[in-house]
Image (cartoon, helix red, strand yellow):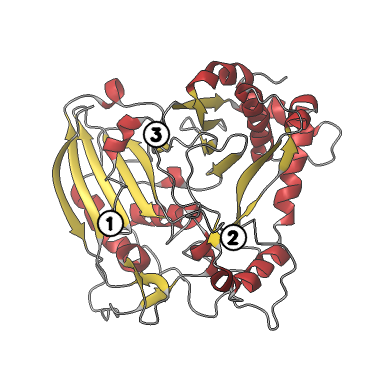
Amino acid sequence: MEVKVVSSKLVKPSYPAGSPLPDTNEHVPSSVFDKATYHIQMAIIYAFSPPGPSTADIERGLAAVLGAYRLFAGQVRRGPDGAPGVLLNDHGARLVEASVDARLADIAPAKPSPAVLRLHPDLDGDVAEVVQVQLTRFACGSLAVGFTANHAVADGHATSDFLVAWGRAARGLPVGPPPPHHRRGLFPPRHPPRVQFEHRGVEYYRPSPSSHGHGEAPHHGHGVVIHKAHFTKDFIAGLRAKASEGRGRPFSRFETILAHLWRAMTRARGLGNPHQASTIRISVDGRRRLAAPPGYFGNLVLWAFPRATVGELLDRPLRHAAQAIHDAVARVDDAYFQSFVDFASSGAVEEEGLEATAVLKDVLCPDLEVDSWLTFPFYELDFGGGCPSYFMPSYFPTEGMLFLVPSYLGDGSVDAFVPVFDHNLEAFKHCCYSMD
């Protein structure tokens, strides 16, 4: 797929006529959740069927929504006191226009592959903008929108709110008031702090003197392919019924699908030691748990870590894996979030030289990580020509890092993007569509 870049420019935020201009020297400090999360550029790809929305409408909407979501128009900088955060300097977002002299249906990959990296701005190196957008027009009139954002500024929940608001602005509809973002004192620690749970080895770890920390591993993806597993509504219903048999309240769709994938990946990987442990890293949203202001924009996620042995996953029924997931997520409750705030605000991270465990790796085996976008309104992005015909994450070839998204079919089915070693691919295909 040959992508020709036509133009690249900064889109500055715009403000309603007559409104006072904001302070462009304001610095928003990172919260304890911003500091603990992944400091990487994330990217997603949308496809829109013809007739595609005009570039002028998309750009106008982007400028308007940046005026409300100013964190995405700023730059990641340290404040006058040296604290990390975002300078609200209205630097703007990068907008790239590109074209492809072919039909989208003929050449666009149906799943993440190296080719999709050409559909959004480069993620490598020192990216000056928090947000980058690439509009790629195809000969058939279709439009691909590649969107990238710095994860250190906002999580998936917040980013999906921004995208929906961008679509409203492009259609000439009001964006609404600026969403609340972090400020000092928003998530205060208790006095005295009560660290009721262990956070060393969970959100933070102590690097050994000989190591350079987890760091961001070279992300090559050698020997890894991304398989898109499509689970129909009926298949999911059958899995839920099987997992929940004899249980008063059925497991959720997420718990059931993830339990199924956990077992399928364990089989496909050919892990031979039944006593070997396998863990999943699952994002848990803390907005309700900490009573965050409605529409809070930023990171507000911690992680649950269900654990089971290979023998338990292979020999015990699906219910066992689903229950392990359910129980682990339930433990990351209000008290756990507040305990983390107390710990992360205590100075222990700085005094002990701890580093965040949220870093990209090339291989997770025997473990997994999952990003679930099943409840986010990503498909509600509408620039005026209707909702997208397709949506998927970009190419992140970390073996074992799963993405769950609602299918573009809109019929209750789910697509799972699963990076596996190429020598495990056929075994995984066999396992993932079986209910055994």
User: How far apart, in angstroms, are the residues tagged by discs 1 and 3?
Assistant: 21 Å
At label 2, the amino acid type is Arg
Q: Residues within 10 Å of mark 2 (few under 14, many from 20)?
A: some
Q: Name the quarter where the N terminus is drawn.
A: top left
Which residue matches tag 1? Answer: 61
Which residue matches tag 3? Answer: 390
Q: Which mark is residue 74?
A: none
Residue occupying image coordinates x 72% and y 34%: 276
Question: Is residue 182 rendered to the left or right of residue 351?
Answer: left
Q: Residues within 10 Å of mark 1 (few under 14, many from 20)?
A: many
- Above or below 21: residue 219: above
Please report whichever mark, 2 or 3, sits nearer to the chain's N-terminal start.
2
Which residue matches tag 2? Answer: 206
- Could you say where residue 94 lies in the image, as x and y percent from the top left? 24, 55
Residue extending farthest left:
6
At label 1, the amino acid type is Gly
**Can you tell which of label 1 and label 3 is closer to the viewer?**
3
Residue occupying image coordinates x 28% and y 77%: 24
At label 3, the amino acid type is Tyr
